[in-house]
Amino acid sequence: MTTTTSQPPASPSPSPAAGSEVWVRRAATVPDSPGYPTVDELIDRFRALAARHPGLVTEHRIGTSTLGEPLLCFTVHEGPLTPDTDHYVVVGGVHPNEPVGAVTTLHLATALCEEPELRAHFGGAWQIVPCVDPDGARLNEGWFGRPADKRAYGRHFYRPAGREQVEWTFPFAYKKAYFDQVLPETLALMRLLDDTRPRFLTTLHNCEAGGVYYYVNRPAPELYGVLADIPASLGLPLATGEPEAAHTPRHAPAVYGCIDMRDAYDHLESLGVDAAATIGGSSSAAYAERYGTFYFVAEVPHWSHPDADDDTPTGERHADVVRRRARALGETGQVLAAVLDAARPRLTIRSPFLRAVEDFVPSLTEIAALEANRADGLPDRPATVSETYDCEASVHSFRIRFGGMLLRALGAEVAAGTATFEVRRLHRELLDRYASWEREAEPVTGDPVPVATLAGIQYGALLAAADHARAADRPGLMAEPG
């Protein structure tokens, strides 16, 4: 695996004649970082950058978080903004357990300030939101300083309940589904998109284990080669196994169409599920469609595993691998549900961790049933190594994530001195089970990837995607927000 040095090479100047190689080389320019900045550290670094470049960087407030924190955007642009200015919107922290974007946004803003050629190449205004969910990010800061420590990651993990996630609470209406419970953070992004009508939008995400994969809101064959070359240049595989969502179209290896809630609705409906009761809101990608925006996501893994892109057939049928995953998820759901159900009447603190597990734990048995149904319709063929790996790794991910948050919900009662004898007993028993899950996950998860490598892949890939958007026509641009 390639790592970067503390003195990164000089950034190559972009040039239309240089082809995609310039974006590949940019991936290696992010300096080493021992971990991820806290919310306060990140904002301080952006403000320091603005102080060094007062003619280029402008700080402005786009909204207020659920807990009352200002949500900030930093605009990097030379000269006055006009109605014809193209906007490139970059949003970090849409999922608070995915902090790679914090490093990516700061490096991007710094490069734009220090390199006139880069600014001139794109010729527009970059609207950079370092962290759109500071409330959630603060609940993950216990592991930000030691990202290679898997035990710290799981035991300090937090991901909001579905209807508390910024990325999945945009308005949605389709068939019998209707959602308008927009979060304050989501409303801030809606305003930013309405104000800028961006040519390009990326929300910065990262996954846990395996390889790199991407989402685009419309096919972009010109991009697929460079999107494969960028992680390869830094020693990371693509993720060519099971897709994150079975209903997303696959455009190229590890390149998918966006997760569209209309497609999700139809997919669930085809499996006999009450889709209207299952689906919440839509995404920033769907909201930005009205402006003809090109939307792009680069998902990069905390831990890498060589099986992630191994397409060698195994001796096991694909459907059987999926069924085994379904059984393991169902068993995990039963274990966590038993603890949650026994503890819930005795819990006095309505913490974010409790709200999250009340949402996620029941979903495990639902996902298990959906996967079992999906297996019945799969073609009769061998599973690949990468598909088998993804099925196994996902089970460990759910255990570590949801088990860790349930431990935090019970631990909040213990720390506050409000835990009953029964809650303390459940906490101890879950700790023992969780420790065994940690040991089982260790060999499957893979090796930690340097922060600079992850941010570098995001940085190079988003620039390549923004360059594609810069040169492309915009379909379906609406005259007014709708």
Image (cartoon, grey):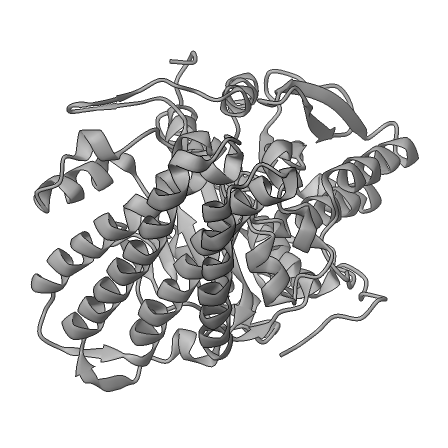
> Depth check: 366 or 279 in front?
366
Q: Quadrant of residue 129?
A: top right
Residue 40 on image: x %, y %: 78, 37
Quadrant for the C terminus in the image = top left
Residue 340 on image: x %, y %: 38, 45
What residue sits 22% from the left and 40% below the top?
A: 263
Q: Residue furthest bottom?
A: 315
Count all numbered tags in the image, as a single digit.
Answer: 0
Q: Is residue 14 visible?
A: no
Residue 372 on image: x %, y %: 15, 60
Q: Is residue 320 left or right of residue 164?
A: left
> Is residue 360 shown above or below 47?
below
Q: Quadrant of residue 273?
A: top left
> Depth check: 360 or 62 in front?
360
What residue sits 46% from the left and 72% below the top?
A: 436
What residue sits 33% from the left and 43% below the top?
A: 341
> Depth check: 82 or 312 in front?
312
> Is residue 187 shown above or below 306?
above
> Depth check: 421 or 451 in front?
421
Quadrant for the N terminus in the image = bottom right
What residue sits 67% from the left and 67% below the top?
A: 450
Q: Residue furthest right?
A: 52
Q: Is residue 447 left or right of residue 289?
A: right
Residue 236 on image: x %, y %: 54, 72
Q: Is residue 213 visible?
A: yes
Q: Is residue 131 left or right of residue 262?
A: right
